[in-house]
Amino acid sequence: MRYTVRHITRFTYETPITESVVEARMQPRSDGFQRCVHFALTTMPQSRVMTYPDHDGNAVHHFDIPARHSRLVVTAEAMVDAAERDPVPESMGPGAWDAIDALAASGEWFEHLAPSAFARSTGALDAFAQELELDRAEDPLRLLRRLMQEMHARLEYRPKSTRVDSPIDEALTARCGVCQDFSHIFIALARRLGIPSRYVSGYLFPRTESESRTAAHATHAWAECYLPGLGWCGFDPTNNEDASVGHIRVAVGRDYSDVPPTRGVYKGLTAVKTELAVAVRVASVKPPVSGDVLPFTPWMSRDAGAPLPDADADRQQQQQQ
């Protein structure tokens, strides 16, 4: 399956600022069953966009706008080829927990087992784990799928119910949150069981609107767990499904703090962000018959001249993944 993605982020400021330095993680990954065949990132005001890979293999684009400006628009356009993934079995079989413990003993998976900024044990998380009766009596794969099902049933998906910096206790207490919260809770509980886990940011192309809780014009997030013999397996607790061909992976990290779509600093005496609007479009397209591949564009310096959508449905907060 081939997908096109257009992701527009607009920042406006109460008063003009004198400089912006920004980095973005918006380029889909090329690994496993997915390949990014074209990517371009443009800015308005225009800038020269540079790129480098971080330690997790995520493409990081960065730019500096040293001129005075009161608005910044970042437009990312991608084309991605995604293949059907190998089916994940129902269970791992005897000795699975011993194999998982061997991963921890090796020390290689420390950062995916240790607490991180948004995926850590709390009193509310411990209480939720007891409520779900999570223990190692079950096969690891069956346990992870049951955790996904229980979270989907017990927690409501509610856009804008939390902030980008909300701890998991807020979602657990209110019993509602967004994809970011679902993923952090799932990761924290999986790590609590000794299973290496990480956060995935990206996009979701649902087969039909009724098959996805996720907002139609927003980014998405889910979790991956490393299982011996299977590698990284994706779990989407927001939608109660294994990650599939429609889950377009952009970046991976310990949690959201490692992979925000945009992050940066600005210079100005009263530079206060009064508006942050994000619009995302994901569509499927037919692959080219001739097998040609669009050129990869690591940076561009033209204006992002396309008009922004004005519909209220397109105005999504960046954290509402």
Image (cartoon, grey):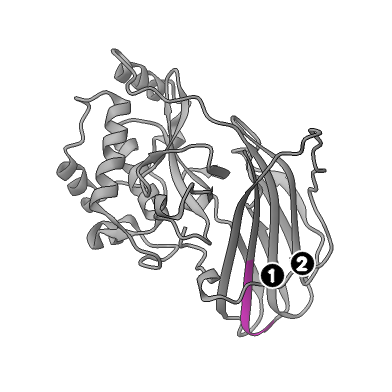
The outermost residue toward the top is 94
Does the magenta stretch mainly form a helix, a strand or a loop? strand
Q: Tell me if residue 232 comes above or below residue 37 in the rendering.
A: above
Q: For mark 1, what is the residue?
A: 73
**Residue plotted at (45% across, 25% down):** 87
Please identify the quarter of the rendering in which residue 303 is found.
bottom right
Q: Which residues are magenta?
A: 9-16
Q: Quadrant of the N terminus?
A: top right
The numbered dot on residue 304 is: 2
* Position in image of residue 185 (x %, y %): 33, 48
Residue 297 within the segment the image draws in magenta: no
Along the viewing direction, whichever of 95 and 315 lies nearer the viewer? 315
78 left or right of 235?
right
Q: Which of the two discs, 2 and 1, labels the residue nearer the N terminus?
A: 1
Assign a secondary structure to mark 2: loop
3D distance between C-alphas at marks 2 and 1:
7 Å
Q: Tell me if residue 60 comes above or below residue 277 in the rendering.
A: above
- Contact check, label 2 and label 1, Cβ < 8 Å: yes
Residue 11 within the segment the image draws in magenta: yes
Please identify the quarter of the rendering in which residue 144 is found.
top left
The type of residue carrying mark 2 is Ala
**Residue plotted at (34% across, 21% down):** 101
The type of residue carrying mark 1 is Val
